[in-house]
Amino acid sequence: MARRLLILGSTGSIGTQALDIVARDPELELVGLSAERSADALIEQARSFGVDRIALADADAGARAAEAWTDGEVLSGAEGLVRLVVESDADLVLNALVGSAGLGPTVAALGEGIDLALANKESLVVGGELVMALAEGTGAQILPVDSEHSALHQLIAGEGAGGTASIDKLVLTASGGPFRGRSRAELADVSIQDALAHPTWDMGGKITIDSATLMNKGLEVIEAHHLFGIGYDRIDVVVHPQSIVHSMITLCDGAALAHLGYPDMRVPISYALHHPDRVDVPVRALDLTEVGALTFEPVDHEAFPALGLARAAAIAGGTGPCVLNAANEIAVHAFLGERLSFLGIAAVIEGTLERLPAAPVRAFESLYEADREARTIATELVEAWSQRLLH
Ligand code: MG
């Protein structure tokens, strides 16, 4: 039976790769698409996939799209995205939005009991407890699209009804990004182009910078904690430059299971869109003799303090991860705008966490407020840093 699919963030890296999966599978019926502000690209996608409802998060882009495209309905703004979700009658929503802007649509989908293919890790970083409780309450499933979590989802499923009881540790692999092996001093003057040159994965700008700082892995530790209900002391990170092992679980009897494959996001996207089935994806079968060697090394926490900051914020709990994420979004944006140095990213996050200690979270409103406050403080810190030209 056809599965009705809504894609949020369809013009981004995950979104376009998801459309490649959809184009190969007549059983996936697209019922809506959204983008931040790429109106022309979104309209083009809607035409080629026969979609009659689109949404643009940016209101001005939405107004432009409504003039340019009269074959269907154009929604706009944050409310437009939520309406697209709630009124879509979708069986599955792929949330491929960037940043904490993804939280609202995640809540809308799960609240409606719609299964969620989640590429927006910030939804769980910011609102983990509330989001998981909401999914449990409505019975909606969350299927991770992040490659490490997709791997873990498959490995844990292999443990059967026992679930995580036999699992000793989750081990997330990290490529180490473009700056692996460099010392802190060697990171002082790196450029945006250097940071955007990821060695193994082809991804969007924000996540590529997060991979360069290792904040991406910090966010993923938090994501794994919520998705699989495993304590932070049982989630490890290991650097694995080849990105062939996508993650591993170690078990109570001394066995360890790993998930392997060439790095191609269409694999985890297809898994999430077809679960519990598997379908063909045009990716080569893994040839270990071609790969030759798989290597592993520990994280250099002095050169890459972001992972430690994320872990500390996660353990502090409450609004901690929300503040961490908001400060990171502001800092990465400033780095991409050449208003902050690479080392300044972690410094701004650390400063924001110091000025906004973790507070308990009772409702989504406290998260939205912490997000706003953290953005204001992080923006001030970016300003202070660029004025002093500190590294
Ligand atoms: Mg990942």
Image (cartoon, rainbow, N blue to C red):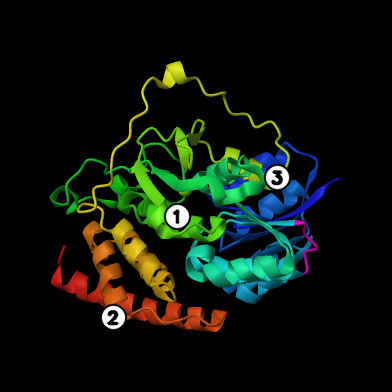
Q: Residues within 10 Å of mark 3 (few under 14, many from 20)?
A: few
Query: Residue at coordinates 24% horizontally, 53% vertically from top-left?
Result: 301
Say above or below: 239 vs 308.
above
Q: Is residue 266 above or below residue 61?
A: above
| Residue behind mark 1 | 220
- Does the Cβ of the disc 3 residue fall within 8 Å of ligand 1? no
For the N terminus, the quadrant is top right
- Mark 1 element type: helix
Give the amino acid type for the residue marked by disc 1 in the picture. Answer: Glu
Q: Secondary structure at mark 2?
A: helix
Residue 196 versus residue 218: which sits nearer the camera? 218
Mark 2 crowd level (few <14, some 14–19, many ≥20, 10 Å Cα): few
> What residue sits right under mark 2 in the picture?
355
Q: Is residue 25 left or right of residue 79?
A: right
Query: Is residue 129 found left or right of 160 in the rendered image?
Result: left
Answer above or below: position of 292 versus 177.
above
Q: How many marks?
A: 3
Q: Is residue 28 left or right of residue 260?
A: right
Residue at disc 1, CB closer than 8 Å to ligand 1: yes
Crowd band around label 1 with a 10 angstrom C-alpha radius: few (<14), some (14–19), many (20+): many
Q: Position of residue 336 (x, y in %)?
A: 34, 59
On whether residue 338 falls in the magenta region, the answer is no
For marks 2 and 3 on the same chain, the one whose residue lies earlier in the sequence:
3
Horizontal and vertical percent for residue 73? 76, 66
Q: Earlier in the sequence, mark 3 or mark 1?
A: 1
Name the residue type under label 2: Arg
- The residue that appears at 83% across and 46% down in the rendered structure is 2
> Bounds of the magenta span?
87-91
- Which residue is pictured at 26% across the width and 44% down the height? 179
- Where residue 275 is drawn, which disc sits there? 3
Q: Amino acid at mark 3?
A: His
